[in-house]
Amino acid sequence: MSVNITRKWLVERGFPSGGLLFLPRGYKKRFAASYRIDLFFEDDPVEATGLQEAVSRVYMLEWPYNRNVKGRYI
């Protein structure tokens, strides 16, 4: 269900099509660095902060639990 919702959201906002991966917490930074991922969509504040070191941009929708997350590439 999450794949369909995410894909629809991306299309509606004009993002290019491509593969979608859903990874468990704790693996995302390592995965992004290993595969040279350029951008990442993330809503977990801990993951988003760590991903800044591996990707050029982290897109994060604002939710009550991540509203105060700040970062250079977020």
Image (cartoon, rainbow, N blue to C red):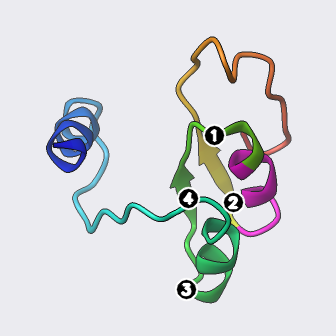
**Residue at 80% across, 57% down:** 50
Q: Secondary structure at mark 1?
A: loop
Question: Which residue is disc 2 drawn over?
Answer: 56
Mark 3 or mark 1, earlier in chain: 3
> Is 40 placed above or below 66 here?
below
**Residue at 74% across, 69% down:** 54
**Where, by quadrant of the figure, is residue 51 drawn?**
bottom right
Q: Is residue 32 left or right of residue 47?
A: left
* Residues at discs 4 and 2 in contact (Cβ within 8 Å): yes
Question: Which residue is disc 3 drawn over?
Answer: 35
Q: Label 2 amino acid? A: Ser
Secondary structure of the magenta portion, mostly? helix
Mark in the foreground, 1 or 2: 1
Q: Crowdedness of circle 4 by 10 Å Cα count: few (<14), some, many (20+)?
A: some
Q: Crowdedness of circle 3 by 10 Å Cα count: few (<14), some, many (20+)?
A: few
Specify start and end residues of the magenta stretch as a single range: 47-54
> Is 53 placed above or below 62 here?
below
Q: Label 3 amino acid? A: Tyr
**Where, by quadrant of the figure, is residue 21 drawn?**
bottom left
Q: How far is disc 1 from disc 4 in space, using C-alphas?
A: 15 Å
Q: Secondary structure at mark 4?
A: strand
Q: Which mark is residue 44?
A: 1
Q: How far is disc 3 from disc 2 in space, using C-alphas?
A: 13 Å
Q: How far is disc 4 from disc 3 in space, using C-alphas?
A: 11 Å
> Is 57 placed above or below 28 here?
above
List x then y, in percent, for residue 19.
Answer: 27, 68
Q: How far is disc 4 from disc 2 in space, using C-alphas?
A: 6 Å
Mark 4 or mark 2, earlier in chain: 4
Q: Does residue 57 belong to the magenta stretch?
A: no
Q: Label 1 amino acid? A: Asp
**Residue at 60% across, 74% down:** 32
Question: Which residue is disc 4 drawn over?
Answer: 39
